[in-house]
Image (tube, rainbow, N blue to C red):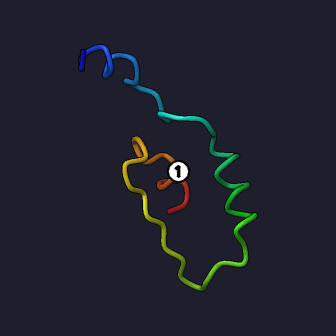
Amino acid sequence: MTEAFFALFHGLPRQGPGSDATTLRLLELAAPLPERPRVLDLGCGPGRSALLLA
């Protein structure tokens, strides 16, 4: 079972809906942000959004 899971998601940049453009748009909508904002990426796949925000 786990082999099928890893085979399905191997090589995919995301494990859910959305895109880099979606992440950046949501970031725009969250403005204004504090001078040093923080992001918590907890159990959200391979961290694609966190890498983009970093």
Left or right? Give the position of 30 relative to 2: right
Residue type beneath disc 1: Ser
Identify the residue at image location x=50%, y=63%: 54
Identify the residue at image location x=59%, y=35%: 17
Depth order, front residue of 5/23 = 5
**Classed neighbour count for the residue bearing mark 1: other residues with Cα under 10 Å, few (<14), some (14–19), many (≥20):** many
State whether residue 21 is above or below residue 6: below
Q: Which image quarter: residue 28?
A: bottom right
Q: How many marks?
A: 1
Depth order, front residue of 39/53 = 39
Left or right? Give the position of 49 relative to 20: left
Identify the residue at image location x=48%, y=46%: 48
State whether residue 29 is above or below residue 34: above
Percent x, y of residue 50: 48, 55
Percent x, y of residue 20: 63, 45
Q: Quadrant of the N terminus?
A: top left
Identify the element where label 1 is drawn.
helix
Percent x, y of residue 16: 53, 35
State whether residue 44 is above or below residue 25: above
- Residue sitting farthest toward the left: 2
Q: Which image quarter: residue 6?
A: top left
Residue labelled with disc 1? 49
- Residue sitting farthest toward the bottom: 35
Identify the residue at image location x=41%, y=26%: 11
Left or right? Give the position of 30 relative to 53: right
